[in-house]
Image (tube, grey):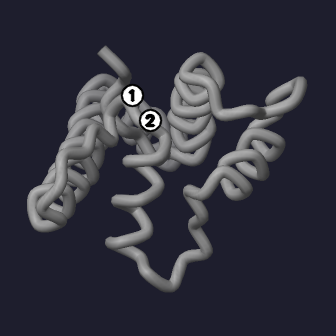
Amino acid sequence: MRILDSLIEAFRDIIGEMKEPIGEIKERIEERKREHLAKRLDQQVASAGEARDWRHSIVDLIKTAKEIFPKAQLDYSRVGLKQLAGELGYKGDYTGTAEQNIWMHDELLKRLADHNICLPPRV
């Protein structure tokens, strides 16, 4: 076997050994991102001085995000929620029912996760 081939094989074996640890590191990084984002939202809620539940309420989630990022075009009015419902693929007429808002909150979490933006799941 050529020296070059032996080196390539050896390095592939070394890299192969790292697959599991790299996967574990990625999982830890994702968990830390989730924790950081949740902590930042919690801090904003605490400083707002009003009761909010961004983990379950689409309105509270958008309102809190808007306070953190005031330049972002985030609208939690009925018109804004209707627009967001359409963007998330809601079929039918959005009227702002609790069921629609729960669906929208869950769907938003899924869409954010598709972009590697993970928030704690609804419990």
Tell me where residue 64 appears, x and y as whole percent.
34, 59
What is the quadrant of residue 74 in the picture? bottom right
Give the number of the disc on residue 16.
Answer: 1
Q: CA distance from mark 1 to mark 2?
A: 6 Å
- Residue holding disc 2: 12
Give the number of the disc on residue 115.
Answer: none
Residue shown at 33%/72% (left/top)? Answer: 68
Q: Which element type, helix, strand or loop, lies under badge 2?
A: helix
Foreground mark, 1 or 2, reads: 1
What is the quadrant of residue 88 in the picture? top right
Residue found at the far right of this picture = 92
User: Can residue 115 be seen here?
Assistant: yes
Tell me where residue 27 appears, x and y as whole percent.
29, 32
Number of numbered discs on residues: 2
Q: Can you say whether 20 is above or below 39 in the image?
A: above
Residue type at the position of mark 1? Gly
86 lies left or right of 78: right
40 lies left or right of 91: left
Residue type at the position of mark 2? Arg
Q: Which element type, helix, strand or loop, lies under badge 1?
A: helix
User: Can residue 14 be seen here?
Assistant: no
Residue shown at 11%/66% (left/top)? Answer: 47
Which of 12/35 is in front?
35
Which of 34/99 is in front?
99
Tell me where residue 81 appears, x and y as whole percent.
66, 48
Residue shown at 44%/35% (left/top)? Answer: 12
CA neighbours of label 1 inside 10 A, class few (<14), some (14 to 19), many (20+) = few
Tell me where residue 26 appears, x and y as whole percent.
32, 38
Which of 64/51 is in front?
51
What is the quadrant of residue 41 in the picture? bottom left
Q: Decide: marks 1, 2 in contact (CB < 8 A)? A: yes
Q: Can you say whether 66 is above or below 102 in the image?
A: below
